[in-house]
Image: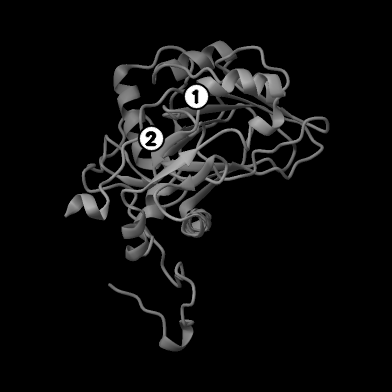
């Protein structure tokens, strides 16, 4: 059944992103078969992104069959939530290592006080160290191999506030106007850390690390290899410019894409509790940590899994 608003209720669109009424994307592409989960209970939080998993413990040995179902759930729902997971740092690391090589973040020892392990980012915020992660981003897109996924564990949370939000960038791409999709398919963008981490680091550290981490070039529209899903892969924390077009057009497109990703219809919001764990596919969603709890204390620990080189889609000229 098709639903339509009365003509008098629809404003004249003056915005290229104007959308009134239902704004619903498919959760997964047709290449993926929707099947029930047999080894745990999955409870969706929204129609396309975010699901809570219950009935399993992340500590100890997880069977290959459970891991296969979790991998399918991650691909389908983009971010998974686990409650009441009383695990320590070693068990956190063991779970993350089941998904690939663990990332060694080069900048946190300069920008986040209290780091003790290269593969575990301790995000401790309080009256002396304020939260600055309240910007929509994919992690580590300044790297040649951006993170595949991340496992974030709540260690200490404020009594209220400090939620994290994720946005489904596959749904965002699917629901862009067709003419805008045609403009961005095949384009590439430059990503860099200098205007984020770099401005908070000592000059000598920047000079030492810069040769090892030059700007990275990634497709504006990325393809998830397991599913063929197209996702937006630019973010306001690290993307500097779109290549091959004018500065004005690059700025226009980036502003438009960033605003589009911020639509509530593409998002899920998690209210943290102690011992909650979030596990997300960094390729297919962006996240935003609400910084509304100052001066209360919030401590999280994140372990990320190394990804691969992003692959894009052909542009109009490549399809001729």
The N terminus, quarter of image: bottom left
In the displayed orientation, state which residue is furthest to the left: 320
Q: Which residue is mark 1?
A: 304
User: Disc 1 versus disc 2: distance between alpha carbons?
Assistant: 15 Å
Instruction: Identify the residue at horizontal 41%, vertical 12% (top origin).
Output: 61
Q: Quadrant of residue 89?
A: top right
Give the x, y percent position of residue 283.
41, 37
Towards the viewer: 274 or 248: 248
Towards the viewer: 198 or 236: 198
Determine whether, in the image, residue 124 is placed left or right of residue 278: right
Q: Which structural element holds mark 1?
A: strand
Give the x, y percent position of residue 281.
42, 34
Determine whether, in the image, residue 278 is placed left or right of residue 23: right
Towards the viewer: 267 or 39: 267
Determine whether, in the image, residue 206 is placed left or right of residue 35: right
Give the x, y percent position of residue 278.
52, 32
Q: Are marks 1 and 2 in contact (CB under 8 Å)?
A: no
Please give the label number shown on residue 74. Answer: 2
Instruction: Identify the residue at horizontal 30%, vertical 18% (top origin).
Output: 64
Dot 1 crowding, Cα within 10 Å, few <14, some 14–19, many 20+: many
Sooner in the amino-acid sequence: mark 1 or mark 2: 2
Q: Quadrant of residue 179?
A: bottom left
In the displayed orientation, state which residue is furthest to the bottom: 8
Eye-nearest disc, 1 or 2: 1
Q: Which structural element holds mark 2?
A: helix
Give the x, y percent position of residue 309.
35, 30
Vertical position of residue 285 compared to residue 274: above or below: below
């Amino acid at each position: 059944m098709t639903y339509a608003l009365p003509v008098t209720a629809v404003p004249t669109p003056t915005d290229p992103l104007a959308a009134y009424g239902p704004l619903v994307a498919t959760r997964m592409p047709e290449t993926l078969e929707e099947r029930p989960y047999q080894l745990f209970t999955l409870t969706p939080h929204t129609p396309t992104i975010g699901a809570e998993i219950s009935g399993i413990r992340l500590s100890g040995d997880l069977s290959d069959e459970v891991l296969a179902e979790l991998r399918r759930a991650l691909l389908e729902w983009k971010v998974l939530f686990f409650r009441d997971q009383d695990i320590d740092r070693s068990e956190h690391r063991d779970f993350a290592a089941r998904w690939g090589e663990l990332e060694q973040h080069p900048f946190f020892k300069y920008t986040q006080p209290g780091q003790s392990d290269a593969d575990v980012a301790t995000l401790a915020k309080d009256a002396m160290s304020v939260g600055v992660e309240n910007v929509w981003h994919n992690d580590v897109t300044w790297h040649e191999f951006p993170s595949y996924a991340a496992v974030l564990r709540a260690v200490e949370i404020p009594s209220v506030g400090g939620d994290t939000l994720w946005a489904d960038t596959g749904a965002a791409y699917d629901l862009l106007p067709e003419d805008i999709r045609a403009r961005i398919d095949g384009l590439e963008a430059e990503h860099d850390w200098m205007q984020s981490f770099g401005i908070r680091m000592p000059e000598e550290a920047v000079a030492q690390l810069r040769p090892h981490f030059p700007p990275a070039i990634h497709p504006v529209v990325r393809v998830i290899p397991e599913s063929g899903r197209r996702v937006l892969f630019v973010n306001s924390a690290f993307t500097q410019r779109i290549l091959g077009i004018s500065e004005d057009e690059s700025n226009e497109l980036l502003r438009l894409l960033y605003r589009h990703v911020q639509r509530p219809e593409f998002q899920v919001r998690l209210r943290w509790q102690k011992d909650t764990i979030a596990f997300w596919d960094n390729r297919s969603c962006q996240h935003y940590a609400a910084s509304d709890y100052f001066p209360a204390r919030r401590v999280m620990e994140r372990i990320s899994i190394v990804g691969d080189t992003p692959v894009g889609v052909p542009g109009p000229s490549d399809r001729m």
